[in-house]
Image (spheres, rainbow, N blue to C red):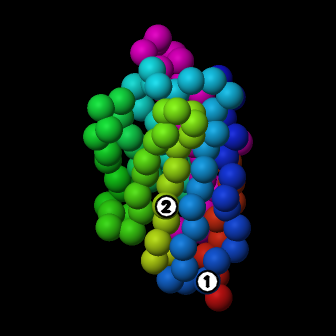
Amino acid sequence: VQLQASGGGLVQPGGSLRLSCAASGSIASANVVGWRRQAPGKQRELVAVIMSGSGTNYAESVKGRFTISRDNAKNTVYLQMNSLEPEDTAVYLCYAMFPMPGSIYWGQGTLVTVSS
C-alpha cells in the first residue's frame, strides 16, 4: 500500500486546512490509520489516529481543533485542522497499520506552515 499525503501549505494563525491521505489500496482492513507530525528539531509526535471501529485519539495539543476521519470507500484519511497555531507548523505524515505484524505504511509527508 502506498500513501500520498496532500493539502499542506501556508496559512495564517487561526486559519484552517484539510489534509488528505490517499492510499493506493484498501485501508478498510487497517487497524489504525493516522497522522503524526515532525517539527524542525523535534521528535515525531502523534497528532491523531482513527481505529477500525471508528474510535479516535488525539494529542492533547490538538483536541477540539483537529478532526480525523476516514472514508474506506475512497481509501482516504482526512485531517481537518481548525484554529491553527504557529506551534502546529510541521511536516505531517500519514500512516496505516494493518493486522499482519510489521505492516505499517507511511506517506511522504506534507508541510504545514502557520505564520502571519
Residue 25 visible in the shown view: yes
Return the residue nearer the eye: 116 or 7: 7
Query: Residue 12, which numbered label?
Result: 1
SS label for mark 1: loop
Please tell me whether residue 95 belongs to the stretch shown in magenta: yes
Q: Residue furthest top?
A: 100
Q: Is residue 62 left or right of residue 107?
A: left
Relative placement, left or right, of 18 versus 2 is: left
- Whole-angstrom CA distance, mark 2 to mark 1, is 15 Å
Q: Nearer the viewer, residue 106 or 20?
A: 20
**Vertically, is 116 above or below 45?**
below
Residue topped by disc 2 = 80
Q: Which residues are magenta?
A: 87-108
Residue 27 is situated, as x and y percent measured from the top left of the image, at 52, 27
Mark 2 against mark 1, which lies toward the viewer?
Answer: 2
Q: Amino acid at mark 1?
A: Gln
Secondary structure beneath disc 2? strand
Q: Residues within 10 Å of mark 1 (few under 14, many from 20)?
A: some
| Residue 62: in magenta span | no
Query: Residue 24 location in percent, x, y?
Result: 68, 28
Compared with 24, 5 (above or below) is below
In depth, the one of 92 and 20 nearer the eye is: 20
Q: Residue at x 53, y 18 (%)?
A: 103
Q: Residue sitting at 50 percent across and 83 percent down?
A: 14
**Residue plotted at (63% across, 33% down):** 23
44 over 30 or under it: above or below: below
Q: Are marks 2 and 1 in contact (CB under 8 Å)?
A: no
Query: Residue 107: x and y, percent?
Result: 66, 38
- Which residue lies most toward the bottom here? 116
In this view of the protein, can residue 107 be seen by the observer? Answer: no
Q: In x, y percent, where is residue 10?
A: 69, 74
